[in-house]
C-alpha cells in the first residue's frame, strides 16, 4: 500500500467550553440555576450577585424594566443559538458566532475592556476581613430543626408506638419482625408462619404467639395497619370506629360476609343478601367509602417537592403578559473592584489570573442572559398559542409541538426541548411545566385538529357528570365525542382514561 499526503477541506463542529456551558445552563431548572450561579460566583472573584435592594435601585436608575410587558426583550446582536450545535441538524455556524462575539457583551459587560489602567496596587485595595468570629442568631430564626428535619416514616411511627407498649423482650423482638414486613401502604406482606420461620429458632416462637403479636400491631395508628388483605384492612378500621357510629354493625357484616359482592359492585345481590333497603345500603356504602384502603400512605409519603416558577403570566389591561420570575433568575454583575485591578501590559501570574477570570465572567453572563432571553421568548410564544387555555381551561387547549415554537422563536427544536424541560410557568390557573402545553392532536370530522389534552379534559368531565348507576362505557364516550365532531376510537378513549387513573365503567358503578 502506497502512502501519500493529500489536502482535504471540510467542516467540523467544535464544542468549546463556552458552548458546553451555554447548553448546560439552558437545561437547568430554577433551583439548579441558583446553585450553579452561587458556585460560579464562589469560584470566580470577578462575579457578584446583585442583591434585591440593589436590583431595585438599578431598576429605578434605568427608568424601565429591561424586559417589556409583552415578554419580548431585545436580543443581543450577532448571538446565535448555542444549544442547537450539539445536534447534527443544528446550525453549524453557532460556534463561530460565539467565537466572533467573545469580546462583545450586552449591558454593563461591554463597558469593561480587557485591559484597564489602574492607579492602585493590590495591597491598597485588598484588606483582610475583621469580621466577628461568631454572629448571633436572630430570635426569629429559631425552629431550624423542626423545619428541616426528615419526615418520620411509617416504620418510625410504628416503632415509636411499640416502645410505649408494655411487652416482654421476646414479644418485642416478634413485633419488630412484624413491623419490618409492613410495606409503605401499611399492609403486612408475610403470614404468621413466614414470620415465625424468619425468626431465630432458639427463641422458640410459635404461630399462635405470632398471631397475637400481629393483633397487637393492628391496634396501632393508623387504623387498618398490618392487615394482610383489603378485607381485613376495612374490618380493622370499622371495628375501631365508635360503637355508636350509624350503620357500623351492618358495614362490618357486609365486609366480613359479602366482600366478593362488594368488590364486584353487585348492589342487587347485596340488597338481597343483607336484607337492607336501598337507602340503608347507600348509608353503609358511604361509610365503607370513607375508609382508607392504604392506611400507611398518609405517613412518611415523602418530602414535599417545591417548585419555583421560572415565568410569570398575568393579564394586564386585557392582554396576557409574560415576564421572568426575578427570584428564579438571579442577576449577576462584574465586580468593578477586582476588574479595576487588571493592569495593561502586565504579564504576571496574578494579573493573568484576573484577566482569565474576567473573560470567564463575561462568557457566563452572556450565556446566562441568552438562557433567560430564550426562555422568555419560548414562554411568550406558548402563551400566544394557548390563550384559549388561559381563558377557558383545558378543554380549549390547542395542539402544539416543539417544531411550532422552534419556528416561531427562530431556535432549534433541541433548544426548545431543553428550555421547556423542568421549567415552570405560573398562570392564574396554576403552575404548569412548559412541557404541559405541548400535546399531540386528533382529527375532527370537519378536518380540523383537537389537542389530546383537551380530549382528556372532556373525558374527565363526562365521567364526572355521568349517572353513577349507569356509568358511560368507553364506546359511549367515543360516541359522545363524535357528536362533538371529534373522531376518536374506543381504544384511544380507553388509553386516555387509563392515563388519568379513571377506572372502567363497571368499577365506577355506585348507588349514589
Image: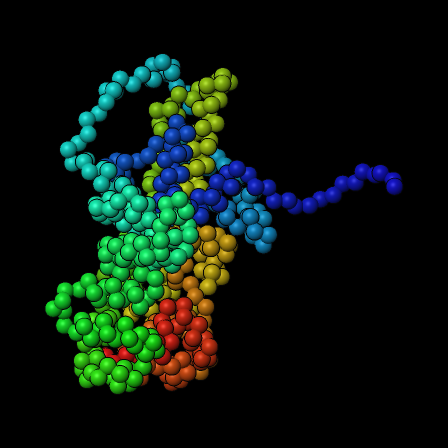
Pinpoint residue 380: horizontal percent, then vertical percent: 37, 57
* Residue 186 in the figure: left or right of residue 166: right
Kindly indicate the quadrant of the structure image that contains residue 207: bottom left
Relative vertical location of residue 336 with respect to residue 487 in this rendering, above or below: above
Residue 304 makes an appearance in the image: no
Decide which of 251, 373 is in the foreground and name it. 251
Residue 146 picture quarter? top left
Is residue 417 left or right of 279 when viewed as pictured?
right
The answer to which of 257 and 47 lies nearer the viewer is 257
Indicate left or right for 83 with 112 as reference: right
Q: Tell me what residue is drawn at x 50 percent, y 46 percent.
A: 82
- The residue at 21%/84% (across/down) is 275
Q: Position of residue 273 (x, y in %)?
A: 26, 83
Location of residue 239 in the rendering, given as x and y in whole percent from the top left corner: 20, 65
Residue 10 visible here: yes
Indicate the position of residue 331 as horizontal and vertical percent values. 33, 39
* 426 lies above or below 173: below
Which image quarter holds the N terminus? top right
In the current view of this chain or complex, which residue is farthest to the right?
1
Position of residue 56 relative to residue 427, above or below, is above
Q: Residue placed at 41% from the left, 34% from the top?
A: 40
Amino acid at each position: 500500500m502506497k502512502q501519500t499526503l493529500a489536502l482535504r477541506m471540510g467542516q467540523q463542529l467544535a464544542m468549546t467550553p463556552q458552548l458546553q456551558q451555554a447548553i448546560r445552563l439552558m437545561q437547568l431548572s430554577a433551583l439548579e440555576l441558583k446553585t450553579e450561579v452561587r458556585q460560579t460566583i464562589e469560584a470566580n472573584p470577578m462575579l457578584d450577585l446583585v442583591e434585591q435592594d440593589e436590583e431595585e435601585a438599578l431598576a429605578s436608575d434605568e427608568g424601565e424594566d429591561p424586559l417589556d410587558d409583552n415578554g419580548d426583550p431585545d436580543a443581543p446582536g450577532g448571538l446565535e443559538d448555542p444549544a442547537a450545535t450539539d445536534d447534527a441538524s443544528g446550525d453549524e455556524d453557532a460556534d463561530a458566532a460565539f467565537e466572533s462575539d467573545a469580546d462583545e457583551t450586552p449591558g454593563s459587560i461591554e463597558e469593561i475592556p480587557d485591559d484597564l489602567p489602574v492607579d492602585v496596587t493590590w495591597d491598597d485595595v485588598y484588606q483582610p476581613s475583621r469580621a466577628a468570629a461568631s454572629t448571633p442568631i436572630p430570635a426569629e430564626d429559631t425552629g431550624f430543626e423542626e423545619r428541616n428535619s426528615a419526615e418520620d416514616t411509617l416504620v418510625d411511627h410504628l416503632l415509636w408506638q411499640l416502645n410505649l407498649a408494655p411487652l416482654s423482650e421476646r414479644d418485642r423482638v416478634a413485633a419488630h419482625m412484624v413491623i419490618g414486613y409492613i410495606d409503605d401502604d401499611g399492609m403486612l406482606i408475610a403470614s404468621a408462619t413466614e414470620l415465625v420461620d424468619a425468626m431465630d429458632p432458639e427463641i422458640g416462637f410459635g404461630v399462635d404467639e405470632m398471631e397475637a403479636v400481629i393483633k397487637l400491631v393492628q391496634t396501632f395508628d393508623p387504623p387498618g395497619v398490618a392487615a394482610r388483605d383489603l378485607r381485613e384492612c376495612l374490618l380493622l378500621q370499622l371495628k375501631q370506629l365508635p360503637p355508636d357510629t350509624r350503620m357500623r354493625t351492618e358495614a362490618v357484616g357486609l365486609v366480613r360476609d359479602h366482600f366478593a359482592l362488594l368488590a364486584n359492585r353487585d348492589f342487587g345481590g347485596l340488597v338481597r343478601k343483607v336484607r337492607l333497603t336501598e337507602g340503608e345500603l347507600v348509608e353503609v356504602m358511604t361509610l365503607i367509602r370513607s375508609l382508607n384502603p392504604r392506611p400507611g400512605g398518609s405517613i412518611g409519603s415523602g418530602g414535599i417537592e417545591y417548585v419555583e416558577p421560572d415565568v410569570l403570566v398575568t393579564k394586564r389591561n386585557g392582554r396576557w403578559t409574560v415576564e421572568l420570575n426575578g427570584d428564579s433568575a438571579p442577576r449577576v454583575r462584574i465586580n468593578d473592584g477586582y476588574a479595576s485591578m487588571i493592569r495593561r501590559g502586565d504579564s504576571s501570574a496574578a494579573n493573568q489570573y484576573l484577566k482569565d477570570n474576567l473573560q470567564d465572567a463575561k462568557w457566563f453572563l452572556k450565556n446566562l442572559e441568552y438562557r433567560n432571553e430564550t426562555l422568555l421568548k419560548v414562554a411568550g410564544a406558548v402563551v400566544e398559542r394557548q390563550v384559549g387555555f388561559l381563558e377557558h381551561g383545558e378543554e380549549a387547549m390547542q395542539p402544539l409541538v416543539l417544531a411550532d415554537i422552534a419556528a416561531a422563536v427562530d431556535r432549534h427544536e433541541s433548544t426548545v426541548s431543553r428550555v421547556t424541560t423542568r421549567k415552570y410557568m405560573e398562570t392564574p390557573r396554576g403552575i404548569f411545566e412548559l412541557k404541559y402545553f405541548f400535546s399531540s392532536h386528533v382529527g375532527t370530522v370537519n378536518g380540523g385538529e383537537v389537542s389530546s389534552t383537551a380530549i382528556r379534559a372532556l373525558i374527565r368531565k363526562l365521567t364526572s357528570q355521568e349517572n353513577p348507576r349507569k356509568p358511560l362505557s368507553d364506546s359511549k364516550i367515543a360516541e359522545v365525542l363524535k357528536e362533538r365532531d371529534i373522531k376518536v376510537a374506543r381504544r384511544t378513549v380507553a388509553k386516555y382514561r387509563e392515563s388519568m387513573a379513571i377506572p372502567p365503567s363497571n368499577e365506577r358503578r355506585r348507588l349514589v
